[in-house]
Image (cartoon, helix red, strand yellow):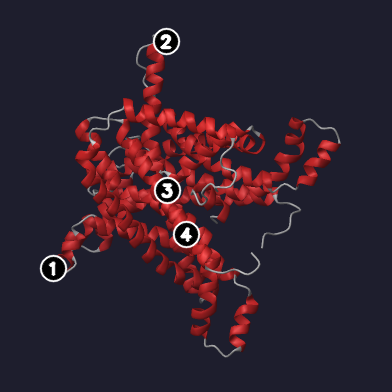
Amino acid sequence: MMSDETVSAMALTDLPSKQGFFKPHRIVLMLVAAVLVFCVVWFMRWEWVPRYSTRLASGIGVTLLMLASTATIGFVLAVPIGLVQVTGPWPLKLLARGFCTVIRGTPLLLQLWLLYYGLGSLFPQFPEIRNSFLWPYLREAWPYGVAALTISFAAYEGEVMRGAFAGVPAGELEAARAYGMSRFTMFRRIWLPRAVHRALPTLNGETVLQLKSTPLVATITVVDVYAVISKVRQETYITYEPLLLLALIYLCLTAILVVAFRYLENRIPTRGA
Amino acid sequence: MADAGSMINWSLLALEPPGWGGVLLGGLWNSIQIAVGGYGLGLLLGTGGAMGKLYGGPVTRDLLEVYTTLVRAVPELVLILILYYAGTDVLNQISAVLGWGAVDISGLAAGIFVIGVVQGAYSTEVLRGAIKAVPAGQIEAARAYGMSPTQIMRRITLPAMLPHAIPGLSNLWLIATKDTALLAVVGFSELTLVTRQAAGSTKAYLLFFCAAGVLYLMVTLVSNVLLGFIERRYRRGMAEPA
């Protein structure tokens, strides 16, 4: 029952607007912030940044790849999960609801470790799997990370899509049926686009939450930007500076996501709103 | 290849020391303690934060905005690392200045602090939205009756906003119970970490991770029942949500 307000309370979905941003007290606060930033840059140790810049860049790439792939596959899975909960026959309905409850009721870290350590220790016992063409991939860590993140996103987003499908006005679907559209055409032309449009603001929040979940894959040896920073901290014995840089990187990624979603939302014309 | 029934060694879950059941339950107890403490601290911070954001001066508002923005835009895992190291470091330096020498901060206190700061930002946003949902006329009427701001808060705003806040706060409680798992990364022996240790030393990975999953799920399901009860109680007399 993750409500829209909770998602927006947990994930940054708005950026400050430009109008009325500059006020006297803000200028003072910004001066204080500038002094703070200057102190951080001047007095803390940053000489390690150039040495690790290529690894950091590839780490950011891995993080973004994880986010994009899991959010895309997860969304594709979420559509049927949400749909069967609204119109499906009861066994499917029950199955989808059970899936959402189990996945949303347990921590993602636990699911990730269950897949990586649990399945990872189970698979080698089956000669069929060891001899299959998938084995070279199953020995790596990233398929388990992608699987866990995808399943989690599908469960959370399936719940959102359930609400969105249920919220499309019945009159629009009846109008589509009156035009003689087949069930699939109606779904493709009316139901899905309207539901996605309704779910977009929540989808924005869920995607930011997904970005915030990606560093967990570092615990199963996927080298994302979090893992690179951990490596920096191990090798240089610097405690805070890498973490501050990491927080800054995630802050920028979140801001980019929010701007991208705002652009998407504005591209879809809404009457009245 | 043995069949599934004999592959599972249920005695590993026994409560007594050769089994690991007792260790798992101990971890669960630690997780629940942190979740309760962190959630309580988060509620305190959130109430203060929501008040500050709605009724505070411009500087307070901007500082709170920075707090909630930072916490909502940076992964919990990173925040936990920063707060964990920075928090213990700051405490140590304060005690060194005061001449008490190095203090040993318990993992429990550090965990509660970390989860509390993160939850504080979320509950600030939830409570702010709930307070804004209270019709302005009700508060104006209270003011017209000559109530002081604290009386308005106690008699009107808090009771009137609770039905709006409870769904969000329920979700935050469920999130708090799941966020405790992240403390495994800083080495605090809560349920997820002890599960991994148990699984690592017995090689029965699937069994232990599934058992821990069941424990987490039970916490969620029991919470859901209780929260539904609370929500129904506080929504008495209100229209059903669509």
Mark 2 or mark 4, which is nearer to you? Answer: 4
Q: Which callout, 4 or 1, points at the residue further toward the start of the chain?
A: 1
**Marking on residue A261:** 4
Secondary structure of residue under mark 4? helix
Tag 2 residue:
B98
Amino acid type, callout 1: Asn
Q: How would you rate the neighbour count of disc 1 (Cα within 10 Å): few for under 14, some for 14-19, many for 20 or more?
A: few
In 3D space, how far apart are the residues under numbered discs 3 and 4 (Cα atoms)? 37 Å
> Which disc number belongs to residue A131?
1
Left-right relation of A6 to B96: right
Mark 3 neighbour density, 10 Å: few (under 14) some (14–19) many (20 or more):
some
Q: Distance between the residues labelled 2 and 4?
A: 50 Å
Residue hosting label 3: B215
Give the foreground label among 1 and 3.
Answer: 1
**Mark 4 or mark 1, which is nearer to you?**
4
Residue A143 locus on image (x, y percent): 26, 59
The chain holding disc 2 is B
Label 1 chain ID: A
